[in-house]
């Protein structure tokens, strides 16, 4: 008899996106002539940048010639990509990160989900609320959650992100071993300043904790004062790991490429309190369980760092930010309190009512689909998330309808 991992029974079925799909399908069945504009999803809509496509094709052509053919590559990624990342994303911003601290992967979902494998089963985990659910569910699977009682797992520390703290959580009173932070945030769209991140770095140093910093949306930051990487905070390289993705940066959601930065200075501890190298542990895990992102994909990712690549991918993220600005403007003018949208593709709106009630009203009255915030955690109740990943025409049309109805 094969016994299962009992922790899987503690996972809460995520009905969020299937519930949305069901309600939209029912509405469309009843109203076949009504147009529906979907502003709920977090997937890109624009095609790949030309420079990435050319590099992608060239990478494929290399495989057709025996002098340039590639078999297994280095598990951590090709040096041409790791060096470009270290130079452009970190060293250019004063962060002392070297190419051998970059681990290229097939995206940030796997890395944010897998990283917790390195920690003890009784490590105390702190997660934001509202949250990108991967951080929560992977720690539930690993047995660190305790029971689910009144909407929360008993052993997690929840970092409430609310209007009162500008969606940047306060330090917890308890000691957390592993802290997940995400800025610009999914779902709130909030950003954190250097001073705010420094508080977390100081906390992690004082408590010998580790920060897992998810920067999947850094490409939307336009305010030059805001940090794009936690490694812009002095000393963060001793207590933080950073996850990045080409998904939103360069439209790679279907192509699949991301990376994780594990600084060599990052120290963790064994059961007897002896220091251990986190870099060595992740290297061991990564090389044991992963055989490298595909060569043409890494060629396409590296093309993002050429001058044309930088200009082309910025044009696309600017386009989404233009949509986000339209969404934000509409809600601000209507008198709703909202966050995000400036340095983020998400706008998080306080609906002053129940999340699902607002969702249903917008669907039925305007044919607009958003994401109910309650699906991201209890602090999301009363909020909805609007995504800027859409066409300008649809975004404008949706906001015109919405303003007319809500005014
Ligand atoms: N982290 C956050 C906060 C996300 O919202 C997403 C995707 O939506 C990811 C990570 C995963 O990105 P990837 O496509 O690289 O797996």
Image (tube, helix red, strand yellow):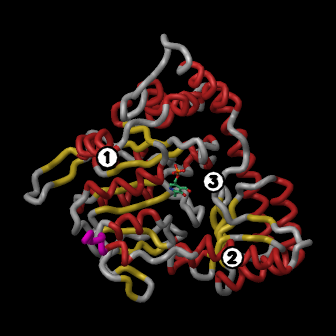
How would you rate the neighbour count of disc 2 (Cα within 10 Å): few for under 14, some for 14-19, many for 20 or more?
few
Residue 398 location, quadrant: bottom right
Tell whether position 2 is magenta. yes
Disc nearest the viewer among 3 and 1 = 3
Residue 387 location, quadrant: bottom right
x and y percentages locating residue 355 in the rendered image: 65, 81
Residue tagged 1:
235
In the image, farthest residue toward the right: 33
Tell me if I can see residue 73 in this picture: yes
Q: Which residues are magenta?
A: 1-6
Does the beta carbon of the residue at mark 1 sit less than 8 Å from ligand 1?
no
Residue tagged 2:
22
Disc nearest the viewer among 2 and 3 = 2
Point 7% across, 58% down: residue? 272
x and y percentages locating residue 215 in the rendered image: 49, 51
Relative to 42, residue 111 above or below: above
Residue tagged 3:
343
Point 36% across, 41% down: residue? 290
In the image, farthest residue toward the left: 272
> 156 or 94: nearer the eye?
156
Point 43% across, 60% down: residue? 181
x and y percentages locating residue 247 in the rendered image: 58, 46
Point 41% across, 68% down: residue? 136
Disc nearest the viewer among 2 and 1 = 2
């Amino acid at each position: 008899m094969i016994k299962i991992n009992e922790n899987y029974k503690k996972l809460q079925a995520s009905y969020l996106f299937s519930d949305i799909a069901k309600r939209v399908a029912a509405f469309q069945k009843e109203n076949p002539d009504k147009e529906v504009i979907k502003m709920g999803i977090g997937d890109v809509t624009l095609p790949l940048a030309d420079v990435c496509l050319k590099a992608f094709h060239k990478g494929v052509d290399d495989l057709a010639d025996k002098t340039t053919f590639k078999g297994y590559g280095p598990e951590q990624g090709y040096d041409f990509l790791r060096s470009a990342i270290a130079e452009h994303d970190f060293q250019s911003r004063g962060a002392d990160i070297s190419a051998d601290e970059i681990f290229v992967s097939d995206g940030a979902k796997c890395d944010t989900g897998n990283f917790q494998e390195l920690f003890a089963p009784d490590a105390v985990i702190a997660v934001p609320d509202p949250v990108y659910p991967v951080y929560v569910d992977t720690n539930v699977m690993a047995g660190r959650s305790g029971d689910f009682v009144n909407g929360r797992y008993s052993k997690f520390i929840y970092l409430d992100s609310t209007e009162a703290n500008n969606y940047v959580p306060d330090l917890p009173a308890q000691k957390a071993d592993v802290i997940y932070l995400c800025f610009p945030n999914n779902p709130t769209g909030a950003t954190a300043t250097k001073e705010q991140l420094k508080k977390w770095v100081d906390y992690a140093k004082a408590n010998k904790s580790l920060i897992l910093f998810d920067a999947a949306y850094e490409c939307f930051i336009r305010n030059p004062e805001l940090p794009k990487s936690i490694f812009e905070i002095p000393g963060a390289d001793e207590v933080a790991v950073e996850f990045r993705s080409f998904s939103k940066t360069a439209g790679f959601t279907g192509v699949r490429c991301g990376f994780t930065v594990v600084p060599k200075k990052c120290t963790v501890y064994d059961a007897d309190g002896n220091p251990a190298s986190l870099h060595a542990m992740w290297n061991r895990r990564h090389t044991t369980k992963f055989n490298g992102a595909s060569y043409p994909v890494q060629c396409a990712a590296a093309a993002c760092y050429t001058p044309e690549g930088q200009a082309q991918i910025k044009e696309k993220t600017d386009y989404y930010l233009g949509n986000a600005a339209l969404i934000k403007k509409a809600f601000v003018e209507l008198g709703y309190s909202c966050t995000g949208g400036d340095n983020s593709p998400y706008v998080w709106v306080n609906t002053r009512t129940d999340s699902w009630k607002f969702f249903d009203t917008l669907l039925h009255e305007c044919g607009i689909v958003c994401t109910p915030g309650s699906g991201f955690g209890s602090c999301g109740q009363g909020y909805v998330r609007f995504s800027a990943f859409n066409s300008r025409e649809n975004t404008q049309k949706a906001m015109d309808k919405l303003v007319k109805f809500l005014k």
